[in-house]
Amino acid sequence: MSDPVLLSVDDGLARITLNRPERLNAFDQDMAHAWERVAVEATSRDDVRAILLSGAGRAFCAGGDVVAMGTSMGSGAEIDALAQRINVGIRALTESAIPVVAAAHGTTAGGGLGILLTSDYAVVGEDSAVGSLYAKIGLTPDLSVSAQLARAVGERRALQLVLQNRMLSAREAQEWGLVAEVVPPGDVLVRAEEIARGWLDGAARAYGEAKRLIRSQPMRTFAEQLAEEARSIGAAFDGDEGKAGVRAFAAASGSKGKETA
């Protein structure tokens, strides 16, 4: 039996794959435990500088496995505990200084929307659809949807999505700001890897720190954020990537100046 969440690391890139294709990668108890373990491991490793999040089969993630909830879980306390485990993995990814790209092909719904929002950059296919659908089965948003959706699309649009049984088309999701790119269905994973490789080929640590600054900003006052920006750019300047990048830029600018003098 295959693991419900897969992890592989190659040349700085961690691939996290939701692997319950027969259930549209919906979370049950085993998958929740695996997600927590894999996300924490990926964000704790020194050799990981970018993360690619994807789903096996024909969908990215359909949220929680409602059938499993109805047949094997006897109380809301069990659902609470399950969500808390998944939340550990969500926090590991969103709070890390590692950029995350999602290849969100097919359907993303319910808690899957929270998993999508865990990424910093999302690519979907032209035939993809994204929605909430919690109220349709009498449940409320979880897995960071209420925490992140309004920040991504604005409060009014967030309310439109959670107060309707509406699925956004790929283009609508892009227009709303939920996803960054829409590509042909067969190119979703390829394009997402190109994004990740672009980070790795550039100043991956700087991209990661930029992500961390944006993601963690709500925890600080304006003055505190300015101070954190100043501290971060100073640390980056002293780092290997910063030193190399500044030297290269200065050398290139100097050469151009001589050519035009």
Image (cartoon, rainbow, N blue to C red):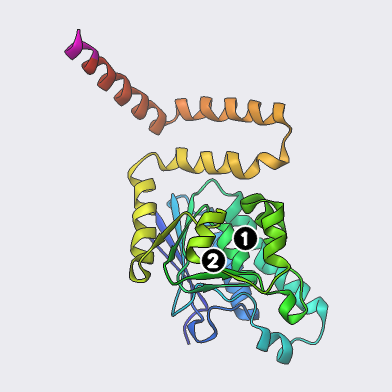
| Quadrant of the frame with the C terminus | top left
Whether the residues at callouts 1 and 2 have beta carbons within 8 Å, the answer is no
> Foreground: 97 or 133?
133
Residue at the top extreme of this rendering: 261
> Foreground: 3 or 158?
158
Q: Is residue 212 magenta?
A: no
Q: Is residue 235 left or right of residue 71?
A: left
Q: Is residue 259 magenta?
A: yes
**Distance of mark 1 from mark 2, alpha carbons?**
11 Å
Q: Amino acid at mark 1?
A: Ile
Q: Which residue is mark 1?
A: 90
User: How dense is the environment of label 2, judged by Cα within 10 Å: few (below 14), some, or many (20 and up)?
Assistant: many
Q: Is residue 118 visible?
A: yes
User: How dense is the environment of label 1, judged by Cα within 10 Å: few (below 14), some, or many (20 and up)?
Assistant: many
Span shown in magenta: 257-261
Q: Is residue 94 left or right of residue 163?
A: left
Mark linked to residue 38: 2
User: What residue sits 61% from the left and 80% below the top?
Assistant: 30
